[in-house]
Image: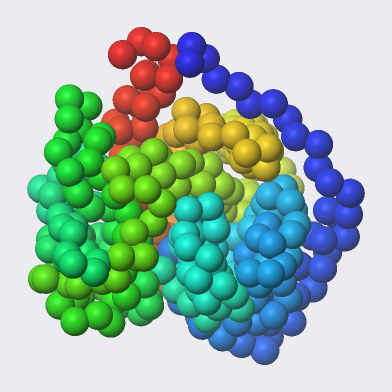
Amino acid sequence: MTGFDFPPPAMPPGTDALRAEVRAFLADSQEALGWRPDSDFGSDWSAAFSCALGARGWIGMCWPRRYGGHERSALERYVVIEELLAAGAPVYAHWVADRQSGPLLLRFGTEEQRQTILPRIAAGECYFAIGMSEPDSGSDLASVRTRAERTADGWRINGTKVWTSNAHRSQYMIALCRTGPAGESRHEGLSQFLIDLEADGVKVSPIVNLAGKHDFNECVFEDVVIPADRLIGQEGDGWRQVTGELALERSGPERILSTFHLFAALVEAAGPEPEPRLAEAIGRLTAEFYALRAMSLAVAGQLEKGELPEVEAAIVKDMGTRFEAEVVETLRRAVPAEPVAGGSANAPSLEAALGATVLGLPSFTLRGGTNEVLRSIIARGLGVR
């Protein structure tokens, strides 16, 4: 590859009606379930909301009906996700399963896995954790040391995964393990496995973050024995599979909307006639937002065609997380509101919401890959590394 492309997709008919339908549902569910808005997709866990969303057919939207899906397009799914995040809905419970674990099983899983797990995900009842990161590895996935060794009738897994969001509340993890020698590129000998987090030998321990919240975990696997059919795809094909999974993780609207609630607060605080510097800042942020949204939509269109836009997804994620941080800094300079520690990002007080978001900002550039890793992917894609 010597370049990248963001071709604008043609939106399917009926997307305006779909938006209106989602907005009506969100208004009703907010009143019924009492959730508070927060546009960071990793903020609030609500099993009840996930089940209500699944009942409307808005989880597993693109999957075949025989697996609980609804055979809608990736662009229709994009519309639903965009509305959910803009409204600040509590999507965390089903998020990983819907975004990447389900599609991975749909593509590489066994028929039994598809028939038993995918309908539960689509119903909003089955949750997944991501087993990629490891201690002392940072974002270097190729340095995976968790090993899966063949047994007479399956696999034995030993190792440790960290930063496994919601592993303490999820039923399954898809873990990247070493099954063979690394080779010159270090990408060989890696495989993915479906692990039941209730299995013997799995220990899930909390990692409490700076804000005092427990989302992250350390997962230790000690002689965890799994059946042979828990290998996902082909042995040794894990690197290709996981890079495809990361394209799904890096390019969605969540990469530009995590601070949208603060962006809206900034515009509201500025009023109809903001002073020139603030008007310029809001105009610049708005232009960046629309450009990034167009790029993110383009990647969704490429995924719809079965393409693997790894570089384009990395660009969206890198630029998107920088934009999200810029929103926060602009708000802090423009509005006389000091961040207050100990609040939550969906608190009614702007000061408390700002304080929670400031604490969470560093994680925005880590989840889905650090900016340094993303820029390495981009450089390789452009042929300059």
Q: Nearer the viewer, residue 13 or 91?
A: 13
Residue 222 screen position, x and y as percent: 10, 71
Quadrant where the image shows the C terminus? top left
Camera sees residue 93? no
Q: Is residue 379 above or below residue 151?
A: above
Residue drawn at (65%, 81%) of the image: 52
Residue at x 72%, y 48% (from the top left corner): 75
The residue under the point 48% across, 53% down is 108
Instruction: Look at the image and tell me whether residue 226 can be seen.
Output: yes
The x and y percentages for residue 306 are 62, 39
* Image side of residue 341 versus residue 51, left or right: left
Looking at this view, name the residue that lies furthest to the bottom. Answer: 32
Given residues 113 and 325, the one toward you in this image is 113
Name the residue at the front extreme: 152
The answer to whether 344 appears left or right of 48 in the picture is: left
Instruction: Estimate the x, y position of residue 188 in percent, counting from the top left.
Output: 24, 36
Seen in the image, is 116 located left or right of residue 366? right
Q: Position of residue 29 (x, y in %)?
A: 68, 82
Q: How is the image coloured?
A: rainbow
Residue 114 versus residue 151: which sits nearer the camera?
Answer: 151
Name the one closer to the observer, 162 or 122: 122
Residue drawn at the location 24% of the way across and 69% of the way down: 153
